[in-house]
Amino acid sequence: MARYTEARCRLCRRSGEKLMLKGDKCLTRCVFDKRPKPPGPQLGRRRRLSDRGIQLREKQKVRYSYGLMEAQLRRFFAEASRQPGVTGDTLIVLLERRLDNVVYRLGFADSLSQARQIVRHGHILLNGKKTDIPSCLVQENDTIGWREGSRKTNYYKQLVENIGSKTTSQWLSIDKAKMEGKVIALPTPDDVGIRYDTAAVVEHYSR
């Protein structure tokens, strides 16, 4: 499957805001702070975006933030539209429940892309079983830990030293001594702190 391989800072510049695609590096060494304009040649005054353009931009922001391909996001939207409640909020909550995102929110990785790689390489246990599917959705009371063999790696040893300075989302808890996380409740829109115009995303897919 095709995957975006160019500089991630270009995605932030294209979206017009920081998407935190590099984790903590976005707070210290961010290209967007120096060059907030879109990549490519500058053609003078920017034209006002149409309603369709705004919908597309908001949809792309969601896709970039969660590192998804278009087909993946469409599948999540289809699932969100079948569930009760506000479709846009449900979509973001579903994306938050992805295993790679949970690994990132627990502080086991510095960025979402790094968390996805950790999951794919089989380092993570979900309820005691090795799970290498980043898109797997966690449930309430699920536990997320490290495979025994992965605890011997240099990355894990460095993580143990630094985990104390990392924060965890409110709907998750972490036992830093055991390096094990738990889903204490499914996330809500308030827990996620949605920063997208989800109504525009819904309009984009509902046209």
Image: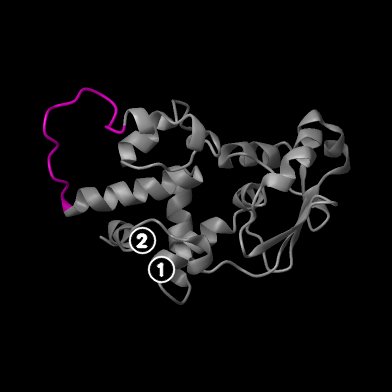
Residue 1 is at least partly visible in this image = no
Tag 2 residue? 198
- The type of residue carrying mark 2 is Thr
Tag 1 residue? 87
SS class, disc 2: helix
Front: mark 1 or 2: 2
- Asked if the magenta segment contains residue 17, the reply would be no
Q: Residue at x 29, y 59 (%)?
A: 200
- The type of residue carrying mark 1 is Thr
N-terminal of the pair, mark 1 or mark 2, is 1
Q: Is residue 185 above or below residue 64?
A: below
Given residues 103 and 119, the one toward you in this image is 103
Given residues 65 and 79, the one toward you in this image is 65
SS class, disc 1: helix
Residue 71 is at least partly visible in this image = yes
Given residues 181 and 82, the one toward you in this image is 181
Magenta stretch in the rendered image: 36-50
Residue 174 lies, in percent from the top left, at: 74, 57
Q: Residue at x 79, y 41 (%)?
A: 160
Other residues around mark 1 within 10 Å, as few (<14) / some (14–19) / many (≥20): many
Residue 133 lies, in percent from the top left, at: 66, 47
Q: Main secondary structure of the magenta part?
A: loop
Q: Is 8 placed left or right of 203 in the picture?
A: right
Q: Residue at x 73, y 40 (%)?
A: 162
Q: Is 69 placed left or right of 163 in the picture?
A: left
Q: Residue at x 38, y 47 (%)?
A: 61
